Image (spheres, rainbow, N blue to C red):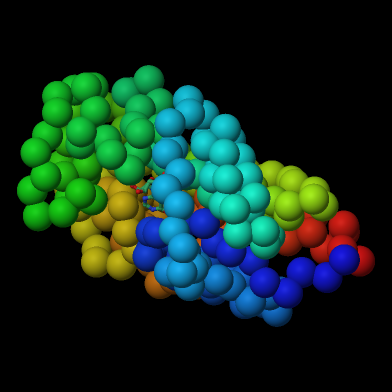
């Protein structure tokens, strides 16, 4: 079996940019949801990253009938009982530590809420989690995961990346993820790790 094209099932531009770079080396063409003329909406309403990623991969794969890579990712903060977790994208709006109105952007508001909740907290340990599912309708499906450990900064720094990058300092570094270039981020990130594991598994299966 030869895979020529995969659909990356995300509308998040930051994620898509990182996936594009990561898949380049495999010589597989990337399609995004923007390439699809007909659009379907898949709710991320499950309680775990894996269930959400499987749901997205299956629903898009069965609808478009092409291999799909779907990811569910997020930030887990130890002092917040691993919140925002699966609610990372819409943390500002959930009933945990107060509901925030969007100010400037969703990412800005999520980061503001997170920093407010951690004010005066000594334990700032956190990790990014990425669960990636590959699903080829009528062939097979597989999944991998990747983690990036670090801590939450006192204030946002940096303009690159997306989401919680400006407030996340990876272990062993003195700068936030938003101060990393794309390649550098992909080398150490949860997503980079999950995608590289996926490549290895796919290479084994497809060779
Ligand atoms: P989803 O996987 O599209 O449900 O959303 C993941 C959310 O987690 C994003 O909207 C971000 O807020 C956050 N997130 C996931 N990966 C990253 C990352 O690499 N950097 C910063 N934030 C991330």
* Res. 119 in view: no
Residue 33 is situated, as x and y percent measured from the top left of the image, at 47, 64
- Give the side of residue 117 with respect to residue 58, left or right: left
Q: How many marks?
A: 0
Residue sitting at the far front: 38
- Give the side of residue 14 with respect to residue 35, left or right: left
Residue sitting at the far right: 207
Position of the N terminus, as image quadrant, is bottom right
> In front here: 86 or 171?
86
Residue at 57% across, 32% down: 51
Residue 73 is situated, as x and y percent measured from the top left of the image, at 47, 44
> In front here: 173 or 159?
159
Indicate the quadrant where residue 150 lies. Answer: top left
> In front here: 180 or 131?
131
Residue at 35% across, 27% down: 83
Residue 61 is situated, as x and y percent measured from the top left of the image, at 63, 53
* Res. 137 in view: yes
> In front here: 125 or 117?
117
Indicate the quadrant where residue 105 lies. Answer: bottom left
Instruction: Indicate whether 115 appears above or below 78.
Output: below
Instruction: Indicate whether 168 appears above or below 44.
Output: below
Residue 46 is situated, as x and y percent measured from the top left of the image, at 48, 29
- Give the side of residue 198 with respect to residue 111, left or right: right
Position of the C terminus, as image quadrant, is bottom right
Residue at 20% across, 33% down: 93
Residue at 83% across, 63% down: 203
């Amino acid at each position: 079996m030869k895979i020529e094209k995969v659909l990356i099932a995300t509308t998040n531009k930051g994620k898509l940019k990182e996936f594009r770079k990561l898949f380049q080396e495999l010589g597989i063409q990337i399609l995004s949801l923007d390439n699809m003329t007909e659009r379907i909406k898949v709710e991320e309403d499950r309680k775990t990253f894996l269930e959400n990623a499987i749901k997205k991969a299956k629903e898009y794969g069965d609808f478009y009938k092409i291999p799909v890579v779907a990811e569910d990712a997020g930030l887990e903060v130890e002092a917040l009982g691993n919140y925002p977790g699966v609610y990372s994208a819409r943390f500002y709006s959930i009933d945990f530590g107060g509901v925030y109105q969007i100010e400037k952007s969703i990412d800005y508001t999520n980061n503001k809420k997170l920093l407010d909740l951690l004010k005066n907290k000594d334990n700032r340990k956190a990790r990014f989690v990425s669960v990636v599912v590959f699903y080829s309708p009528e062939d097979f499906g597989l999944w991998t995961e990747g983690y990036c450990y670090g801590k939450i900064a006192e204030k946002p720094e940096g303009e690159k990346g997306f989401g919680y990058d400006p407030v996340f300092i990876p272990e062993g570094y003195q700068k936030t993820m938003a101060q990393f270039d794309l390649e550098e981020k992909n080398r150490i990130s949860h997503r980079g790790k999950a995608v590289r594991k996926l490549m290895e598994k796919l290479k084994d299966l497809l060779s």
